[in-house]
Image (tube, rainbow, N blue to C red):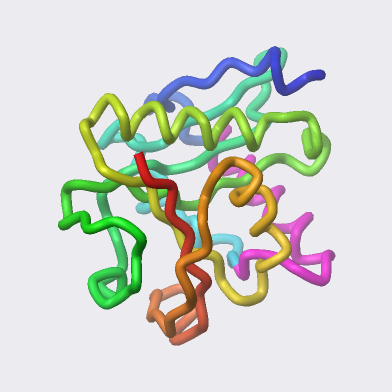
Amino acid sequence: MVGMNASIRPAVDSDYQAVQAFYDQLTEDLEKEPYHPCWTRGVYPGESYLRGSIAAGELYVAEVCGRIAAAMVVNESANEGYLSADWNTQAAPGEFSVIHTLGVGTSYRKQGIGRRMIHHAIQHALRAGHKAVRLDLIDHNLPAAPVYTKAGFVPCGSLRLFYDAVGWRTFYLFEYVL
């Protein structure tokens, strides 16, 4: 399985062009499918978000044979709506990690890379002493939910959340309690 050969590491400044190209191609590929995360090329994930995430050491890439096969951001930044969510564990801001923009290249799907990325995020949260890992899925991307539930995440309901890139939308919340 190719996913087991993927190396996961923090992205560095010199990775920016490859990371942006990865997300641009993935966004283009996903737009052709009936379910997708509603990303918009050049808007989200865009240059300032990706460069800022790289600079903060929050953007991780999985590489296979020197090519980016997957990428994600893991940090403590959560939508303010998370404060009113019905989570399974009590965790104040700074006590949980959040997975953002996890994407696996279309030619690397079903090879275990997404599962490895999620496991990496969980290990990151454990090292940080966090109580949980959380994420949200836009209503238009709900078919991605089984990836997270198979990794041990539990559904925690839904909320209308506002994000600049998509406006007000329904998002499904998931949590992995550490």
Q: Position of residue 54 (x, y in %)?
A: 35, 35
- Which residue is rendered at x = 34% and y = 64% of the image? 87
Where 53 falls versus 31 (above or below)?
above
Assess whether residue 115 is covered by the magenta stretch.
no
- Which residue is rendered at x = 55% and y = 37% of the image? 71
Question: Residue 101 or 83: which is nearer the viewer?
Answer: 83
128 on left or right of 166: left
Where 148 falls versus 140 (above or below)?
above
Question: Residue 170 or 44: which is nearer the viewer?
Answer: 170
Q: Main secondary structure of the magenta part?
A: helix
- Which residue is rendered at x = 52% and y = 50% of the image? 153
Question: Residue 95 or 7: which is nearer the viewer?
Answer: 95
The tally of labels here is 0
Quadrant housing the N terminus: top right
> Residue pushed farthest front?
88
Q: Position of residue 109 (x, y in %)?
A: 79, 39
Q: Where is residue 63 in the image (x, y as percent from the top left)?
A: 62, 21
Q: Where is residue 125 in the image (x, y as percent from the top left)?
A: 32, 34
103 on left or right of 56: right
88 on left or right of 69: left
Q: In which quarter of the image is residue 79?
A: bottom left
Q: Quadrant of residue 123?
A: top left
Q: Give the range drawn in magenta.
A: 18-38
Question: Residue 51 or 88: which is nearer the viewer?
Answer: 88
147 on left or right of 48: right
- Which residue is rendered at x = 47% and y = 28% of the image? 120
Quadrant housing the C terminus: top left
